[in-house]
Amino acid sequence: MLPPCDPAVLQSNPQFSSLYQHLTTSLLNPDGSTRASDTQPARRAAVEDLKGCRIRNAKKQIKKRTLRQLAFDGEGGLPDQHQDTVAVISLYLDSSRQNGKEAGDTLALLAPDIEAFYSSIPAVINPFSEILSSSIASLRMIANAGTKTTPVQSSESSRPRPRARQSASNTATPLSSQLSARVRSLRETQLVELPASRRQMTLTAAEVLATRAQVLEQTVVLLERAKHGALARATKAKAEHLATVAQGMEGKLNVTKFDVIAQIYSPETIAALDRYRQHLGDVRERLEERQELVSQELKAYDAQGRSCQETGSMAEIVQRYGKLAREVEAVKVELRRLE
């Protein structure tokens, strides 16, 4: 099969165009075979035999694949009691390339399954036919893609009778011719529309690349203005200047702080604070000693009051105890104030 050629190439090369047309229309068939050989009777007979063999092999493969789909597809509509039998027969057909002895042993081993399969053929016919009908409908949809077709009726509601089916099959267009026409249409599309689409895509890609180049150019200009231009450099220099000024101000403030601290905490002030701290320490020690003495005296009065039995002496002790308690509280207040 000759590869398709771009119409632009054919238009720009008239001699090559005439040669290409001569090859594709006069000398060669669409499949690449020679047209002159088609008139020979022996070749025609061989071609017909080969075509028949291919058709028989295709039918055999279609039946095997349909049977495998029916066996292993849960939605095939096959009854459950026949599922295993059909699966065994399908696997046997897929792996039937054996020599005579092995084939005989396999047949002897699978004899019960084969007999069961023969007995279940009436139950297998309907789902088998439905799968084939679905495949044919799919092929017809592919062949008629892009053309107006009548809607396909459901197999349940419009299943024709044998005579009607025969008449419909006589009037319907063969699927092979539809597929051939579809292939020719696709080839014409490949020869005519596809190169034009490629050229259009090339032009669009060139426009996209040009737009991208413009975007990159504008990006570079914006970067130059915003980051590497004179305005950006001036702003950066101003920011650095302000940062330096801020550092100088911080240094001046630190110097002023140290001067103020030196003026406040002079040697005389430090000596006075030390003397006052020593005075407070002495006062604290005296108050603590006084608190300890008062506490001891209170303990002594407490012991004396427990041993005393007279009412008058007990009242006097209570008065003195209250007085001492007030003195202790006053000492504690002074201690807290000193702290």
Image (tube, helix red, strand yellow):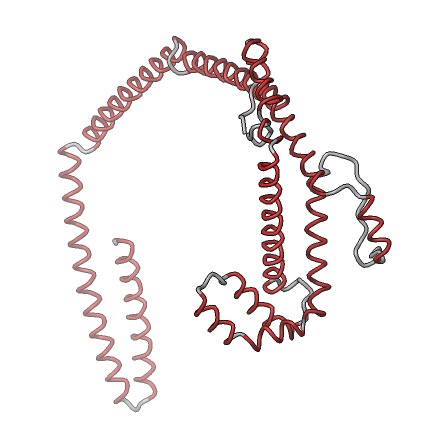
Q: Residue at x 62, y 70 (%)?
A: 83
Image quarter in which the C terminus is found: bottom left
Image quarter in which the N terminus is found: top right
Q: Nearer the viewer, residue 260 or 45?
A: 45
Could you say where residue 256 lies in the image, as x and y percent from the top left? Answer: 24, 24
Q: Residue at x 70, y 49 (%)?
A: 136
Could you say where residue 30 lies in the image, as x and y percent from the top left? Answer: 60, 29
Q: Nearer the viewer, residue 51 or 270?
A: 51
Query: Residue 14's image quarter?
Result: top right
So how many labels did they put on this image? 0
Could you say where residue 50 lies in the image, as x and y percent from the top left? Answer: 58, 44
Q: Is residue 84 left or right of residue 266?
A: right
Q: Nearer the viewer, residue 302 or 68?
A: 68
Could you say where residue 233 lies in the image, as x and y percent from the top left? Answer: 36, 12
* 74 over 271 or under it: above or below: below
Q: Residue at x 46, y 73 (%)?
A: 105
